[in-house]
């Protein structure tokens, strides 16, 4: 069977996308998804997404990791899928869509920047001097110096495969402060099992951890290997984070046909 695909990227975090509103891709297998994401034998991507119909919403997002398994929320993926939706004719001033972690809102500004509202976060847990939280996907945050020179693959893989996390996996983020409300983040992603150029839920988690003692409205500039993002949020005194928005570019790379 020949399938038409689209390739999108958000700050270097790249995705294969299928328009599945006719449900023609409902039976994708784990092996097929893994092959499509393979950078040598397939299209190549950090993950794959389906744009599905969903009653009461503009669309539904279904996300798979590069290992072929359906996974938790992907922030950059969500932003790319919103841009894709606009390109295939779902044009809205505000989007509402459903993902595995619940309902999301999104907007596209006149410069093409996609802002995605993330799930609320109800706490940050300390773990051996580092931090763990869930921003739609589970994240481990380690604050370090000289993040550009850090061995993210080796250290990230060690933490991801350590006994507390080996079975379910966790995304591991290494974060360095670079100024007032400015950080750099590098992420080892489970499911990809490698460093990615950017990770939306990881960037969000890193921003919250970096300034989790600051109450009220915050806006954090986040540098990744793939580009710049920003995270906006409100923090209440009881350590609850709401109105969390992940903002940045999302662009079409190419489209084509492939035999499944």
Image: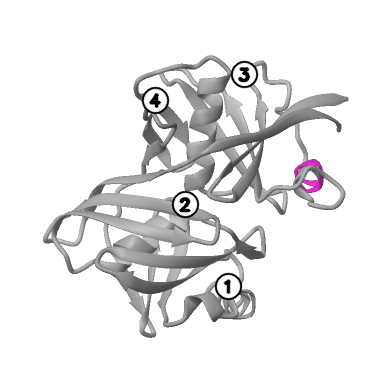
Residue with the mark numbered 2: 200
Magenta includes 38?
A: no
Q: CA distance from mark 4 to mark 2?
A: 18 Å
Q: Where 174 falls versus 129 (above or below)?
A: above
**Other residues around mark 2 within 10 Å, as few (<14) / some (14–19) / many (≥20):** many
Q: Position of residue 114 (x, y in %)?
A: 42, 36
Numbered label attached to residue 191: none
| Label drawn at residue 95 | 4
| Residue at mark 2 to residue at mark 3: CA–CA distance | 25 Å
C-alpha distance separating marks 4 and 3: 17 Å
Q: Nearer the viewer's eye, disc 2 or disc 3?
A: 2
Which residue lies under the disc numbered 3? 21
| Residue 221 placement (x, y as % from top left) | 34, 57
Instruction: Give the residue pinned by disc 1.
Output: 160
Q: Could you say where residue 225 lies in the image, as x and y percent from the top left?
A: 54, 61
Disc 4 or 2, which lies upstream in sequence?
4
In primary-sequence order, the first of circles 4 and 3 is: 3
Real-space Cα separation, disc 1 to disc 3, in angstroms: 35 Å
How crowded pointer 3 is (Cα within 10 Å; few <14, some 14-19, many 20+) is rated as some
Q: Which residues are magenta?
A: 30-35
**Circle 3 — which element?**
loop
Q: Quadrant of the N terminus?
A: top right
SS state under label 1: helix
Question: Is the C terminus in the top left, top right, bottom left or bottom right quadrant?
Answer: top right
Asked if labels 3 and 1 touch by Cβ distance under 8 angstroms, the answer is: no
Q: Is residue 34 magenta?
A: yes
Residue at disc 4, secondary structure: strand
Q: Position of residue 36 (x, y in %)?
A: 78, 42
**Camera-side residue: 18 or 148?**
148
Camera-near label (1 vs 4) is 4
* Residue at image point 51% right, 30% down: 83
Q: Is residue 217 above or below residue 5?
A: below
């Amino acid at each position: 069977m020949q399938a038409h695909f689209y390739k999108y990227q958000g700050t270097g975090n790249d995705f294969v996308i299928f328009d599945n509103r006719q449900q023609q891709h409902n039976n994708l297998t784990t092996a097929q998804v893994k092959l499509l994401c393979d950078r040598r034998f397939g299209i190549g991507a950090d993950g794959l997404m389906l744009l599905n119909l969903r009653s009461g919403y503009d669309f539904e997002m279904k996300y798979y990791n590069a290992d072929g398994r359906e996974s938790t929320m992907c922030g950059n993926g969500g932003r790319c899928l919103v841009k894709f939706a606009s390109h295939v004719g779902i044009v809205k001033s505000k989007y509402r869509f459903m993902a595995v972690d619940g309902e999301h809102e999104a907007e596209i500004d006149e410069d093409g920047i996609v802002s995605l509202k993330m799930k609320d976060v109800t706490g940050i847990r300390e773990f051996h001097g580092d931090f763990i939280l869930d921003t739609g996907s589970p994240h481990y945050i380690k604050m370090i110096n000289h993040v550009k020179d850090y061995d993210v693959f080796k250290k990230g893989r060690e933490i991801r495969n350590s006994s507390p996390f080996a079975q379910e996996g966790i995304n591991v983020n290494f974060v360095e402060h670079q100024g007032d409300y400015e950080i750099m983040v590098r992420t080892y992603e489970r499911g990809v099992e490698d460093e990615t150029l950017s990770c939306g839920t990881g960037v969000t988690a890193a921003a919250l951890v970096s300034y989790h003692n600051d109450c009220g409205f915050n806006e954090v500039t986040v540098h990744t290997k793939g580009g710049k993002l920003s995270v906006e949020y409100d923090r209440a005194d009881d350590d609850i984070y709401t109105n969390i928005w992940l903002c940045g570019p999302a662009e079409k790379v190419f489209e084509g046909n492939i035999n499944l």
